[in-house]
Image (tube, rainbow, N blue to C red):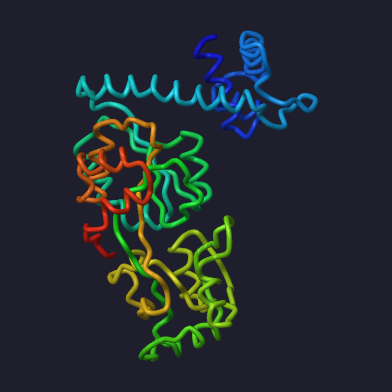
Amino acid sequence: MNLHHLRYAVAVARSGLSVTQAAASLGTSQPAVSRALKELERELGFDLFVRDGRTFSRLTSEGERVIAAARRALDEIENIGVLAANLNDDAHGTLAIATTHTQARYVLPPVVREFRRRFPEVGLHLHQGTSEQIAELIAAERVQLAIATGSESLFPGLVRLPVYRWYRHVIVPRRHPLARVDRLELRELANHPLVTYVFSFAGPSSLEQIFAREGLVPKVALTARDSDVIKTYVRLGLGVGIVASMALVPEEDRDLAVIDASHLFPIHTTWVGYRRRTLLRDYAYEFLQLFGPHLTRRLVARATEAGSAEVRAELFRRIALPMR
C-alpha cells in the first residue's frame, strides 16, 4: 500500500465515484486510476467499491471505513507540509477562496488589496458561485476557505466563523410608487414582480417561506446570483429588487430608491469556514483577521478545537458582530 493508491481512491470517492473526473482532478489517465484501485483492493483483500459493469455504484462498507481513514491520513500528511512552511516563515504559496459574487464584488476588495500588499508572493484565487457550488468546491478541497451566508446543512465538517451581519433591502427606480411608501409591508411588496437572488436548491427559499407565513406568494420575475444583474433589471423596470445591504453603493446607485426592509426580512450572518482537519498557512490566518478583525489567531484556534457548533456559537455570542 502506498500514498499514491490512497490518493486515487479518495479522489474517486470525492468525485462522486467517477473515475473519469477523478483522473482529471489528479492530472492522470482513467486507466491509471483504475489500475491503482485494483492494486489497492488486491493488497487489502476486499473491494472498496461496488461495481455495476464498468462504473462504481457505491462504496462497500469496508470501503467507507478505508476511505475515511485515508482522508484523515492524507490530511495529516498535507498538514506536515503546511507546518513546515509556517515554521520556515515561507510567505509563498496560494490561497483559494470560494464565495458569492456579492462578497467578491462589494466586501472583499479592501481585504484583498491589503492581503496582496502584505503577501505579494502568495497567489490569491477567488471562485464565485452559489452556496451549492461553494460547498462543492470546499468538499472537493479545491479551495481552503469558504465565505457564505446561512446554508449550514450544505457545509458539514466545516469550522464556520461568523464575520458580520446584514439585512436585505428593497430597491426601486426613484419614480416607482413604492419609493413614496413610508413603511413597506409584505402584502404591498407581494403585489409587484420581484427581482432577487437565485433560490437555494437545497430546500425551500427563505424568501418564499417569509411570504408563505403571511399567506402570500411572491411574484418572482427574475432571479440572479449577481447583485449587479439584479440592479440592472430593476433599472430596466422589470421588477422590484431585493438585495443584500452591502451590495448598495451610494455613489453608484443614486438613481435607485433604497427602502428599509429590516422589519420584513430576518438578519443574516456571513461566515468564513475551513475544513476541520486542515492546518492553515500563516497567511490564511492573516486573511481571516483582515476579513473579520475579531478573528484573532487565538479565537480561531479555540473555535477549531471546539467540539460542536453550539460551543463555537457560545465563543462568539459576546462579540458584537459589525453590520453592513
Nearer to me, 243 or 270? 270
Quadrant for residue 203, please give it: bottom right
Count of labels in the image? 0
| Placement of 35 over or under 317, stated as above or below | above
The quarter of the picture where the C terminus appears is: bottom left
Relative image position of residue 183 (x, y in whole percent): 37, 88
| Placement of 123 over or under 223, stated as above or below | above
Q: Going by the image, does 232 lie left or right of 83?
A: right
Picture residue at 50% right of the left edge, 53% below the top: 130
Quadrant for residue 48, please give it: top right
Relative image position of residue 8 (x, y in whole percent): 57, 20
The quarter of the picture where the N terminus appears is: top right
Picture residue at 31% right of the left edge, 27% below the top: 93
| Placement of 11 over or under 154, stated as above or below | above
Relative image position of residue 158 (x, y in whole percent): 41, 42
Q: Going by the image, does 300 lie left or right of 185?
A: left
Picture residue at 24% right of the left edge, 32% below the top: 282
Picture residue at 54% right of the left edge, 71% below the top: 209
Relative image position of residue 105 (x, y in whole percent): 36, 55
Q: Going by the image, does 100 lie left or right of 217?
A: left
| Placement of 162 over or under 287, stated as above or below | below
